[in-house]
Amino acid sequence: MPIRNIAVGHVGEATHPDALRAGLAEFFSTLIFVFAGEGSGMAFSKLTDGAANTPSGLIAASIAHAFALFVAVSVGANISGGHVNPAVTFGAFLGGNITLLRGILYWIAQLLGSTVACLLLKFATGGLETAAFGLSAGVGVWQAVVLEIVMTFGLVYTVYATAVDPKKGSLGTIAPLAIGFIVGANILIGGAFDGASMNPAVSFGPAVVSWSWENHWVYWVGPLIGGGLAGVIYEVIFIGYGTHEQLPTTDY
């Protein structure tokens, strides 16, 4: 298994120009994604005078997130790998494809990008609230955790299959599209139950700006478990121990 590739990294890595550029790329990619995704929900709320979500609203959120993630991954892919998600970064770390120190740098950039996006949205919309993720009536915390695990597993598994696997060939050219599609599809599944985060950064920004932390841990535990499992399983079973050289840290 690829445990041998897991590395803490060098102390100087956090200040290396390439790492800093990669972190900045993650910041902007996450900002782009959250601004469009969270903003689509705020726009729907304004158009419906704050009415409860409807099937059309769920579809709109799915499309907005799919499109925005496609763009966010695409613009960051050549610089940082376009993770745009701490769960993707965690899965890449457990698979031996990024060092711990660079992963922490990515996490900081992703969380800041999400927070800044929500602050910009609140200012640009005249003070409208960026709603924090929450559970729907009748959905328990552990049900939501399982939902987030499965959805994030599907997301990170897709990332590995289309962007990380050295045998991906020409499939790698459509990786951002496939990644956007799986997130859009998962929103159609989980949006009505827990908001379908699959991304701790996406949940973090709205929670900070609205200062609402109820059940926030669900949106960390579920995605990190799902992303970690996907990274290890795909790396061990489908890429295999000793069958490839360690990928550059700027890849997924």
Image (tube, helix red, strand yellow):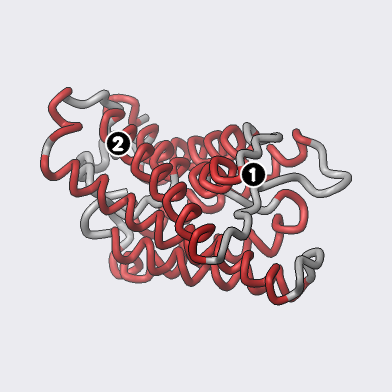
Q: Is residue 216 above or below residue 80?
A: above
User: How many callouts does the rendering have?
Assistant: 2
Q: Is residue 144 left or right of residue 19?
A: right
Dot 2 surroundings within 10 Å: few (below 14), some, or many (20 or more)? some
The amino acid at mark 1 is Glu
The residue that label 1 is drawn on is 148
If the image is split into quadrants, where does the N terminus sit? top left
Residue 184 in the image, given as x and y percentages of width and height:
58, 65
The quadrant in which residue 162 appears is bottom left
Query: Is any part of residue 64 visible from this angle?
Result: yes
Residue 24 in the image, given as x and y percentages of width and height:
25, 49
Query: Is any part of residue 153 visible from this angle?
Result: no
The quadrant in which residue 212 appears is top right
Q: Secondary structure at mark 1?
A: helix
Dot 1 surroundings within 10 Å: few (below 14), some, or many (20 or more)? many
The residue that label 2 is drawn on is 105
Q: Is residue 74 above or below residue 228?
A: below
Residue 142 in the image, given as x and y percentages of width and height:
75, 33
Q: Is residue 67 above or below residue 249?
A: below
Residue 83 in the image, given as x and y percentages of width and height:
37, 50
Which residue, as the protein is rendered here, is positioned at the far right? 138
Q: Is there a contact, CB below 8 Å, between mark 1 and mark 2? A: no
Q: Residue at x 16, y 31 (%)?
A: 13
Q: Residue at x 33, y 41 (%)?
A: 106
Identify the mark at residue 11; answer none if there is no mark.
none
Q: Is residue 63 above or below residue 172?
A: below
Who comes first in sequence, dot 1 or dot 2? 2
Q: Residue at x 75, y 74 (%)?
A: 48
Observer-side mark, 1 or 2, equals 2
Q: Is residue 79 left or right of residue 112?
A: left
Which residue, as the protein is rendered here, is positioned at the far front? 126
